[in-house]
Image: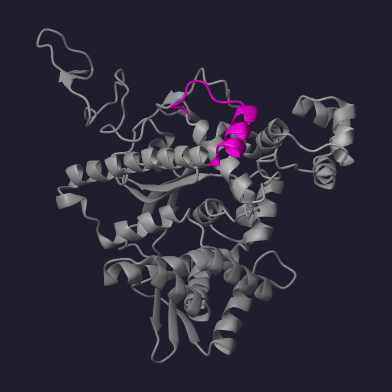
């Protein structure tokens, strides 16, 4: 098979101009000479696999591979699989390129085997969930089935995201995002829905027969605006939502209904924070959540959640993990575009900073954490209190967490000031039942796949040792 020659001189020059780099500075980053870089920029020489790897590593958000090219997709998937911490000695870009080009069938089988390994780990989490909650056979409840559908979809739904972005751009005018007036006018005039704000037992109440919408006025302004966007999405994008639900092949009727609600929420976020503009602004402010909240008039949680959905092919954002944790430590929302996987619900590692954040509202905490596979993450967590609007209804208290692998730390403002070498990284796990660490003083349960050793004559913080 002949090697695929990649010429990208104009793209490389644009990349250098965008980052304000001289040829000498970019050449140093890529480990090549200035003359070699000049030849590449003039399309006199192609990019080698090693240089493609260096560009992807140094500019992960700018140097997007052509995801429509099968050979490039294979190389990218092989690189990701071979970079798993399971393998102590990663292969070089040249070795990966040779395998991908000369042995494509072997490369595909290796990629499939690695995917099966990852899925086996996910199955172990499902079994752990069943054991922890007495769920016979590991069967999933409707909300769990929907949660897993979003996870398996990468938390990105292309047809819905693009339709919502187009609608949001239509309504926003000269602003970054549609304001309340624009949403209200479209709901009333274009969708023929009457709208009132009133003290109400629920957050939103819609009568489809009468075309009447009631929104609880006691909610914070960002929440009221989100409820408007939800109803707008559920009505204006009904056909797109139905198409996705029909293709999801969920088992229970309740699951399909929950997915419809979840998709309307997803589209509401995409209307208020249109993909391209939100991604550009997020990069410009280095993913400073407070500044994104001001720019798009959204809540802290809404901005964090939207950042976790920026996975559009050829325009991906930083791969973040995102979750919401309540006062009891239950994970009520979760998604990870990173290698970090959460406990399926509850039982999350107590050493993770998000648990401390729940008890300290309106204060941002940061943490450098390391999982048992050796991967390090920068985490940001903030405790939030959502008022109820009434003395006899307790406010909701929870924390949200957002984080990325340290490879993307320079894009994440919350990594500033942290020592990223890992010397002071907090050793966290997924959950005690899945964590192999033998020396954790915070362990609540032994690992599901290990024996325990009990010595009646010796006692440490944990009353057993891991076999």
Image position of 58 with respect to 13: above or below: above
Image position of 8 with respect to 206: above or below: above
Residue 386 at least partly seen? no
Q: Residue furthest left?
A: 456
The N terminus appears in which quarter of the rendering?
A: top right
Is residue 148 left or right of 59 when viewed as pictured? left
Pinpoint residue 154: horizontal percent, then vertical percent: 48, 53
Is residue 20 left or right of 96 when viewed as pictured? right
Give me the residue at 40% from left, 87% from top: 208
Q: Magenta residues, as a range?
A: 85-104
Q: Residue furthest top?
A: 457
Is residue 225 left or right of 53 when viewed as pictured? left
Would you say residue 100 sits in the magenta stretch? yes
Q: In the figure, residue 129 lies in which quadrant?
A: top left
Front one among 338 and 227: 338
Front one among 197 and 132: 132
Front one among 135 and 83: 83
Residue 79 at least partly seen? yes
Report how many numbered discs are placed on residues in the image: 0
Is residue 46 left or right of 342 when viewed as pictured? right
Give me the residue at 53% from left, 57% from top: 299
Pinpoint residue 140: horizontal percent, then vertical percent: 25, 56
The C terminus appears in which quarter of the rendering?
A: top left
Give me the residue at 71% from left, 67% from top: 175
Image position of 163 with respect to 347: above or below: below
Pinpoint residue 253: horizontal percent, then vertical percent: 28, 72
Q: In the figure, residue 419 lies in which quadrant?
A: top right
Q: How is the image coloured?
A: one colour
Image position of 374 with respect to 227: above or below: above
Pinpoint residue 342: horizontal percent, then vertical percent: 37, 42
């Amino acid at each position: 098979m002949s090697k695929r020659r990649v010429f990208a001189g104009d793209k490389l020059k644009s990349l250098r101009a965008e980052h304000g780099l001289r040829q000498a500075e970019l050449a140093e980053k890529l480990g090549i000479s200035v003359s070699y870089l000049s030849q590449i920029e003039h399309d006199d020489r192609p990019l080698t696999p090693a240089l493609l790897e260096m560009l992807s590593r140094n500019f992960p958000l700018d140097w997007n591979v052509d995801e429509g090219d099968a050979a490039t997709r294979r190389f990218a998937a092989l690189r990701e699989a071979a970079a798993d911490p399971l393998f102590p000695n990663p292969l070089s870009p040249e070795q990966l390129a040779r395998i991908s080009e000369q042995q494509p069938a072997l490369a595909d089988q290796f990629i499939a085997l690695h995917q099966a390994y990852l899925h086996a780990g996910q199955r172990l989490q499902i079994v752990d969930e069943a054991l922890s909650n007495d769920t016979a056979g590991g069967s999933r409840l409707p909300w769990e089935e929907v949660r897993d559908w979003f996870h398996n979809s990468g938390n990105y739904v292309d047809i819905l995201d693009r339709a919502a972005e187009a609608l949001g751009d239509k309504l926003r005018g000269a602003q970054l995002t549609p304001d309340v007036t624009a949403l209200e006018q479209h709901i009333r005039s274009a969708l023929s829905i009457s709208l009132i704000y009133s003290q109400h037992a629920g957050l939103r109440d819609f009568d489809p027969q009468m075309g009447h919408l009631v929104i609880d006025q006691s909610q914070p302004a960002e929440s009221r605006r989100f409820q408007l966007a939800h109803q707008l999405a559920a009505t204006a994008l009904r056909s797109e939502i139905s198409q996705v639900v029909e293709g999801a092949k969920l088992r229970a009727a309740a699951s399909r209904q929950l997915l419809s609600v979840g998709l309307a929420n997803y589209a509401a976020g995409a209307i208020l924070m249109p993909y391209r503009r939100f991604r550009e602004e997020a990069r410009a402010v280095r993913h400073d959540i407070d500044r994104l909240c001001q720019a798009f008039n959204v809540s802290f949680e809404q901005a964090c959640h939207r950042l976790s959905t920026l996975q559009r092919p050829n325009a991906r954002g930083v791969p973040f993990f995102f979750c919401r944790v309540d006062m009891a430590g239950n994970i009520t929302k979760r998604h990870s575009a990173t290698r970090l996987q959460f406990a399926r619900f509850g039982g999350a590692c107590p050493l993770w900073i998000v648990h401390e954040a729940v008890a300290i509202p309106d204060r941002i905490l940061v943490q450098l954490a390391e999982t048992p596979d050796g991967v390090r993450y920068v985490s940001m967590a903030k405790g939030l209190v959502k008022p109820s609007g009434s003395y006899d209804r307790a406010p909701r208290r929870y924390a949200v967490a957002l984080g990325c692998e340290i490879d993307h730390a320079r894009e994440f403002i919350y990594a500033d000031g942290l020592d990223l070498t890992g010397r002071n990284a907090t050793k966290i796990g997924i959950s005690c039942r899945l964590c192999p660490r033998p020396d954790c003083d915070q362990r609540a349960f032994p690992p599901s796949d290990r024996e325990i050793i009990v010595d009646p004559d010796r006692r440490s913080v944990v009353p057993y040792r891991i076999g």
